[in-house]
Structures are given as structure tokens and as C-alpha cells.
Image (cartoon, grey):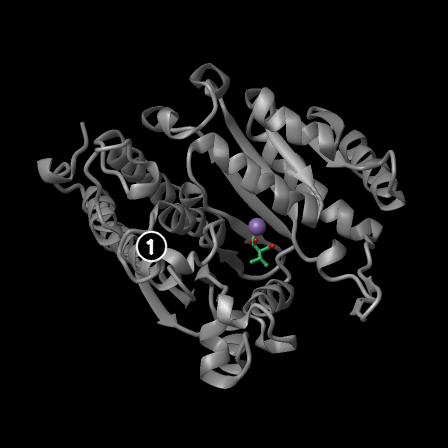
């Protein structure tokens, strides 16, 4: 029997609700495949500040480095938005990414046929959309020094080294080689020196190591337009930290809701798996959050974190079946369509993972 240890960091807002469902699905998968999953919960974000005055408490630090993989909900609390240093929830997430060394953030965006209505884009624009954003995650403006906030001026630093660009580029090229064989690298090389280095380095890695993968370079402003004007043309979109943050929220519009999007952050050690959405304090605790982003992140945890592609495929199929059956959280329901709670959706996915019964008619939309 294979045993895995998973550090679960529910975090803030809707984080605990959606992680509970993701964990439920992970346990169902473990049952199906006869794996033993040991999952323990640790605080991060505002929950960490409450526990120990630190958005990434020492206990959590120790646990994540020991675990085979880390499953995270969301961080963020409006009450702490102006907090400083380690008391800002977001600082805990950034410290966690740095600690784990997860330099590549994978954000797959595919459009589920049953949900085309949920996107504001015309359905014909969405046909064939299946893209992967590879976002550099531990460098750039998020981490650059010096940084400071003064009364009359503030400073952030954009710096990338060649090895930082090379390693994330390799992740993107490798992914493209297993997909449709095309990388779109996004930068602002018409203005920024860092982008010129980015472009040069990505081009060299592509030519030397992945000659079979097609490479194009786009400026970030044009890429933002391409993402909504002709998204089906993009296979793998490779970009730096801040551009990737912005473009991935934009890409969420394609699939209909930010609540559907998962992410995998990988590096040299254990991976970090979290939905793309935030803590959504406005709907927290009401059981209406969409758990699919978190559940799909659990599937990525199985695929990239534990290297169990078959188990991951079972979860992906269960999610697709639940959506096809018309089970809808509020963010993706049509007007007047019945909605399912966070827990009901998790139950439906877990049941299908175990090969159970189809959705209850009461949970099924029209
Ligand atoms: C994300 C989030 C984070 C980021 C925030 C919460 C720090 O927006 O994962 O996309 O900007 O990376
Ligand atoms: Mn973001």
C-alpha cells in the first residue's frame, strides 16, 4: 500500500469550505486506489496570524517541508489588508511559495461544454479553448529587492536572473511537448530590459532543447487581447509573475468562473496546489462557494504532486460528469436554475469517484 502525507492549509474566507470538499474527493480517490493518505491541517494567512501572529506560522513551515504535497484553500482578510510584514495574509502565501521553491505555477484553463453559457464571450469564441498558463512564481516584482513605501515615493524592483527564466521556460516547453506543441511567451520587451533578457533566454532554451516546440513571443498588452479575442490559438502561455497573475484572472473569464480554476505550483521539492480564486470573504461561511477549483487542484496534486495520473484522471472525469449532470454552484448557474451547496457538489464528485450513483434529481439543473 502506498502512503502519502498531505499538509492541508485551509486558510481564510471560503478556503476551509472548499478545501474540505477537495479533501473529501482525495480521500475517495485513495479509497478507490487503496492508497493511504495522511492529511493534517495547518494554519496560513489570517488564520496563521490568529494562531501565532504570523501568516506562515513555524508549525506550518515545518509541516509543509515534510509533506509529500501541500493543498491550500485561500488567504486574505479585509480586516488585515493594511497589516504589515508577517501579519499580512498574502505575505504568508508568498513566503510559502518561496519556502517550497515552487517557481512554476501551472494554471490550466479549459471550457466545459455545459458551461459555455457562463462566459460573457460568444460561444463560437470558446470553441476549442484548452490552454495552460505557466506563470513564474518566486521572482519578479513580487520578491524583488529593494522595496519600500515612503510618504512621497515607493519602490519595487523587477529582476530576473537567467537561471530563473531557464527553469520555468523548461516547464512550459515540456508541457507544450505533451500538448499541442506551442509556447506563447509573454513579455514587454519593447519597454523593459528584464523582458529582453526573458525573450532571449526563452528563445535560446526553445532552440537548443525543444526544437520540436513552436515558439512565439507576444507583448503583454497584445496577449491580453488575444486571450479574449482568439483564446483557442493559445496552447501554453509562459510569462513572468505579475503578468501571469493578471492574465490568469482574465483567462478565468473564458471558462465562466474563477471558482472553477485550479493551479499547481511546482519546483524542486513538494508541490503546492491551490484554486486560483481568493478567500471571497463576502460569501464565506454560507456554503455557496464553488469547490470545483479546489477539487480540480486536488486532481493536480494527484497528477504532479504524487505522480498518480490515473487517480487524477478519475477525479477529472468525476468533475466533468458532475458538471454535465447539471450540478451548479451559484456562480455558474443560469438565472432561476437550482443551485447546489459547496458540500453537495463535493459529495457528488466523491460519489462519482467511488463509482456511485448519478446526481440526485433534486440537485440537477434543467
Ligand atoms: C494568486 C493571488 C495571489 C497572487 C495573491 C493572493 C498574493 O492573486 O494566487 O493569483 O497575486 O499571486
Ligand atoms: Mn491572482
Q: Residue 265 or 83: which is nearer the viewer?
A: 83
Q: Residue 186 or 149: which is nearer the viewer?
A: 149
Element at badge 1?
helix
Q: Is residue 37 left or right of residue 168?
A: left
Q: Is residue 272 left or right of residue 260?
A: right
Q: Residue 110 or 326: which is nearer the viewer?
A: 326
Where residue 181 appears, as percent x and y from the top left, is: 62, 25
- Would you place residue 277 above or below residue 2 in this image? above
- Farthest residue toward the top? 124
- Would you place residue 275 above or below residue 214 in this image? below
Where residue 59 appears, as percent x and y from the top left, is: 49, 81
Q: Is residue 320 left or right of residue 358?
A: right
Where residue 217 appears, as percent x and y from the top left, is: 76, 28
Name the residue at 55% across, 80% down. 54
Name the residue at 81% across, 54% down. 158
Count of numbered marks = 1
Q: In the rendered image, which quarter is residue 363 located in?
A: top left
- Ligand 1's quadrant: bottom right
Q: Which residue was labeled with disc 1?
A: 22
Q: Residue 77 or 113: which is nearer the viewer?
A: 77
- Farthest residue toward the front? 152
The quadrant the N terminus occupies is bottom left
- Farthest residue toward the bottom? 52
Q: In the rendered image, which quarter is residue 81 located in?
A: bottom right
The quadrant the C terminus occupies is top left
Whether residue 140 is visible to the viewer of this picture, yes or no, is: yes
Where residue 111 appears, as percent x and y from the top left, is: 43, 28
- Would you place residue 277 above or below residue 205 in this image? below
Name the residue at 67% across, 38% down. 238
Category of crowding for the residue at label 1, using alpha-carbon neighbours closer than 10 angstroms: few (below 14), some (14–19), many (at least 20): many
Name the residue at 39% across, 45% down. 296
Amino acid at each position: 500500500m502506498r502512503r502519502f502525507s498531505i499538509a492541508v492549509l485551509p486558510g481564510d474566507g471560503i478556503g476551509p469550505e472548499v478545501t474540505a470538499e477537495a479533501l473529501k474527493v482525495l480521500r475517495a480517490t485513495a479509497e478507490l486506489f487503496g492508497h493511504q493518505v495522511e492529511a493534517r491541517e495547518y494554519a496560513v494567512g489570517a488564520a496563521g496570524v490568529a494562531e501565532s501572529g504570523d501568516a506562515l506560522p513555524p508549525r506550518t513551515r515545518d509541516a509543509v517541508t515534510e509533506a509529500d504535497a501541500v493543498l491550500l484553500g485561500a488567504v486574505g482578510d479585509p480586516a488585515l489588508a493594511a497589516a504589515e510584514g508577517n501579519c499580512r495574509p498574502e505575505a504568508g502565501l508568498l513566503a510559502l511559495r518561496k519556502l517550497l521553491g515552487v517557481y512554476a505555477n501551472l494554471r490550466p484553463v479549459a471550457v466545459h461544454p455545459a458551461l459555455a453559457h457562463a462566459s460573457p464571450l460568444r460561444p463560437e469564441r470558446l470553441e476549442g479553448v484548452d490552454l495552460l498558463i505557466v506563470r513564474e512564481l518566486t521572482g519578479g516584482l513580487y520578491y524583488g529587492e529593494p522595496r519600500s513605501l515612503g510618504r512621497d515615493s515607493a519602490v519595487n524592483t523587477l529582476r530576473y536572473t537567467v537561471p530563473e527564466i531557464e527553469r520555468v521556460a523548461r516547464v512550459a516547453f515540456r508541457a507544450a511537448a505533451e500538448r499541442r506543441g506551442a509556447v506563447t511567451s509573454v513579455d514587454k520587451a519593447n519597454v523593459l530590459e528584464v523582458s529582453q533578457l526573458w525573450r532571449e533566454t526563452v528563445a535560446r532554451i526553445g532552440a537548443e532543447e525543444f526544437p520540436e516546440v513552436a515558439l512565439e513571443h507576444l507583448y503583454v498588452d497584445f496577449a491580453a487581447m488575444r486571450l479574449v479575442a482568439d483564446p483557442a490559438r493559445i496552447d501554453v502561455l509562459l510569462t513572468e509573475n505579475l503578468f501571469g497573475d493578471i492574465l490568469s484572472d482574465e483567462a478565468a473569464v473564458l471558462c465562466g468562473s474563477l471558482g472553477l480554476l485550479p493551479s499547481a505550483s511546482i519546483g524542486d521539492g513538494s508541490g503546492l496546489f491551490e484554486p486560483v480564486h481568493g478567500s471571497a470573504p463576502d460569501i464565506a461561511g454560507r456554503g455557496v462557494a464553488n469547490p470545483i477549483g479546489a477539487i480540480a487542484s486536488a486532481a493536480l496534486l494527484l497528477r504532479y504532486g504524487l505522480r498518480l495520473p490515473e487517480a487524477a484522471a478519475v477525479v477529472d472525469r468525476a468533475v466533468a460528469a458532475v458538471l454535465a449532470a447539471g450540478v451548479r454552484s451559484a456562480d455558474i448557474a443560469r438565472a432561476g436554475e437550482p443551485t447546489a451547496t459547496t458540500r453537495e457538489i463535493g459529495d457528488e464528485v466523491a460519489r462519482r469517484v467511488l463509482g456511485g450513483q448519478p446526481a440526485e434529481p433534486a440537485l440537477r439543473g434543467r
